[in-house]
Image: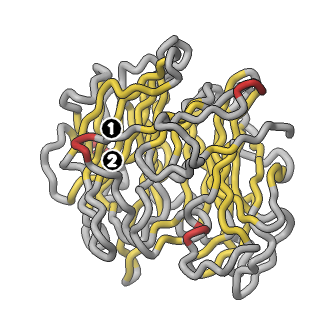
Amino acid sequence: MNFKKALFWTVTVSCILAGTGFALNLPSRLLANENDSDDRRITIDPDAGPRILNTLLETLPDGEPTCCEREWIIRMLHYHPAAVVPRRMYFASCNTDSATPTMFVSLSLGENRVHPEPDPSSGAILETVFDSTTGRFEVRREHRFEECVWMEGITASSDCSTVAALCRRSRGDTDFDFDSLATHANHEWMTQARCAKQEMWLYEWNNGDITSAPEKFVVHRAVDTEWEYGNNYLRLAEDQNTYGIGVKARVFGGGGCHEADAFLVMDRSDHRFTGRGYHWACAFGHTLSNRPVFNPVTGQYALLCGTDGSHTGGPLAGYYFRLEDRPAREFLQTSYQGIQSKGGPGGVLALPDGSYLAVLSGVPGSVRPTNSIPLRPPTSIGIARFSSEGAPMGPVKWVVSMANTYLSYPQLASLGGGRFLLGYGEMKRLNLAADNTDESYRAPWEYWV
């Protein structure tokens, strides 16, 4: 695989608009050169072909900062024992074939309280439109949802007429329009109060206006902030009028609380759940990563998952690929110890021939179970291919490696015509002094595409 490499000078999470080379960055400290002007847009090697245009938004809804994460957030290479980085942001793009491509960003706002005090939080959505004359994303609409603990997965129809997002609500809130969870055969398993203090709701707009009142649907009642394994995603399958909903869940059983995930499929015509997907655990072990995708060729949802368990035995973390109607297949392992794992799944795309293309961070070659994670070798970036039936199509192809640097946070976007945009972060550098706080396992020094 041949690709050009360009440095993306930012330390915040970036939202890549599918089909373009543009990125939107929310307020954070930029690693700017001292001769940078006040205009924070950065063009990389404009004479060499493709460019990256970077828009920095100076303010967010109500002037609030982004929300810090809670304790013990999994960040692919390492858990986060202190709330010092912004929460994960989610995005959805639409009107991508028009002169005004649009991107919706789902994020959480806070007050930047001093750790260990939890950061009071609320949800927000930004609607941004790309202006081709200035090379910037302009905010067309924004809205804060104070009732949402966090705003998470988001999706939009191709013409932007439908927008939906996942809102984490406090347990016992009653202002919903319909209890979709009650229509699921396993709703009792997903309605547990002993280990969960929150619920997941779906907010839906069928007029494309996020400032108007949404319809609200309860989709899960076993959600909590403790031990934040996995993430919460929302996918829209327009051809079959369904939502695919990935939820990190926390339930009680066997005398203790257990962490995994659920993937549920909702019929948009009546907002009732179908029997598709699963109500508990993508694969063996605790779910660390759950990346869903809809395949319009097969008409099925699929997931790229990572857990802290492997069927090979020993202290290994497993990588799994799962179709909505079949058990997960383990295709790779990596070292795992306590609150660290050497890599994890990044994302997955459905290809025009019905197969899948996935990107991940991990260690090339066979991994031997040990009682401690070896510092070397550092993690690399790999590409994996799966058939429409979910079977691996050959071994993982490792495309980016560095002798003394851990690589992580891989992302993959389709540019059309068999072209893809790959992004990854340079993390812990082995030639630097020991980092006792392990911050460099969590936040990249640099991000490359």
Q: Closer to the observer: label 1 or label 2?
A: 1
- Which type of secondary structure does the marked residue at label 2 adopt? strand
Q: Looking at numbered disc 2 in the image, what kind of residue is underneath it? A: Met
Describe residue 408's horizontal placement relative to residue 139 as left or right: right
- Position of the C terminus, as image quadrant, is top right
The answer to whether residue 244 is seen in the rendering is: no
- Where does residue 134 sit, x and y in percent of width and height? 50, 20
Q: Looking at numbered disc 1 in the image, what kind of residue is underneath it? A: Ile
- Where does residue 370 sit, x and y in percent of width and height? 75, 84
- Which type of secondary structure does the marked residue at label 1 adopt? strand
Q: Which residue is denoted by mark 1 in the rendering?
A: 125
Q: Residues within 10 Å of mark 2 (few under 14, many from 20)?
A: many
Question: Which residue appears at 71% of the width and 88% of the height?
Answer: 371
Task: Residue 310: name its quadrant.
Answer: bottom right
**Mark 1 vs mark 2: which is more N-terminal?**
1
- Where does residue 211 sit, x and y in percent of width and height? 23, 29
Tell me how the rendering is colored.
secondary structure
Q: Residues within 10 Å of mark 1 (few under 14, many from 20)?
A: many
Q: Is residue 446 above or below residue 145?
A: below
- Where does residue 231 sit, x and y in percent of width and height? 46, 55
Q: Is residue 323 above or below residue 365?
A: above
Question: Which residue appears at 42% of the width and 73% of the height?
Answer: 82
The Cα atoms of the two marked residues, 1 and 2, are separated by 8 Å
The answer to whether residue 66 is seen in the rendering is: yes
Question: Which residue appears at 22% of the width and 32% of the height?
Answer: 214
Which label is found at residue 296?
A: none
Q: Which residue is denoted by mark 2 in the rendering?
A: 151
Whether tag 1 and tag 2 are in contact, CB under 8 A, the answer is yes
Q: Nearer the viewer, residue 376 or 260?
A: 376
